[in-house]
Image: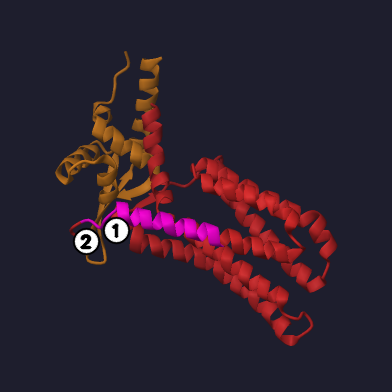
Chain colours: A orange, B red
Amino acid sequence: MSEVDRVIHEPARLLIVALLSGAKEADFLFLQRETNLTKGNLSSHLMKLEEANYIEIEKTFRGKIPLTLVRLTEDGRAAFQSYRKTMNGLLR
Amino acid sequence: MENLDEATRRPMRYLDEDGVPDLLLGLNSLLVGVIFLIAFLLPKDSSIGRIYIFAAQILWGCCIFGMRWGIRTLRRKVTFPRGGYVALANCKVNSVSLWAWRFLRVAVVVAVTLMTAQLLMKNEGTLQRFALPMIAIGMSLAMSVAGWRYKLPYLQWLGLFAVCVYPFQRGGVGLYWMLIGLGTVIAVGGVVRLRGFIASHPLPVETA
């Protein structure tokens, strides 16, 4: 059986990566609304994905409001594609 | 896997939820229809008529650029503070909806160019025989495909409407009325969807 990427395999992180794969970049609020995670929970999942170099996080401001932008890296995109391929192979 | 596909499409669906493109596309179509209807109704031989036709081209260009600016501004002020910011990845060339919208834009540009040519040269025969059916079919196809792709039945109804009203057009003036009618319906649809979006996406507490 092929090895499944444990970083992406976790459902919340898988959803985050799937959402980001359909976008160039998204902010924290969008991810929070779409995943229904709490701020703390989402932050910890984002941190894990960032440690694995699957996403990059940019902290900036929109006027006076802090804005956290999240992007999928090339590694993250490749890992997501590979995960999908692996899961397709397992389910076949 | 089906859920993953659905999740990857969510950013695109989210940007379609707010009705902002519909609102601006409708307003744009309405304005273009009004601008060129006035040009059609003004006496062609008068100096005011000639100046207006020239000004109408500039107004038409302003409408196109204004639409893009309007979408960006409305989203920055209304959509993103409520539902979050998302920017779509560069669209793939095989995206059906992308081609449909490109086709619609080309159809509208061709329509206005032909209308202007008609106003200037008064060559209505060619226009009625070839250009108007193509424009009606083009608009109808673009709206039907976009409606199917984004699961918006009202766009498909409008597509059907665009084809059905063609036989009732009387030369160019019918097309202007069609642009005004369709523009009004699309803009009203956009307003309704934008209101629904605002109601379902209250401002987060820290930005409210």
The range drawn in magenta is B184-204
Q: What secondary structure is the magenta-colored segment mainly?
A: helix
Residue B22, label in figure = none
Label 2, secondary structure: give it.
loop
Q: In which quarter of the image is residue B12?
A: top left
Task: Please give the residue where the numbered disc 2 appears in the rendered image.
Answer: B207
Residue B81, label in figure = 1
**Circle 2: residue type:** Thr
Decide: marks 1, 2 in contact (CB < 8 A)?
yes
Q: State the CA–CA distance, disc 1 to disc 2.
A: 8 Å
Question: A36 left or right of B118?
Answer: left
Residue closest to the far front: B168
- Toward the viewer: B63 or B188? B188
Residue closest to the far bottom: B47
Say above or below: B70 vs B46: above
Query: Which quadrant does the N terminus of chain B fall into?
Result: top left
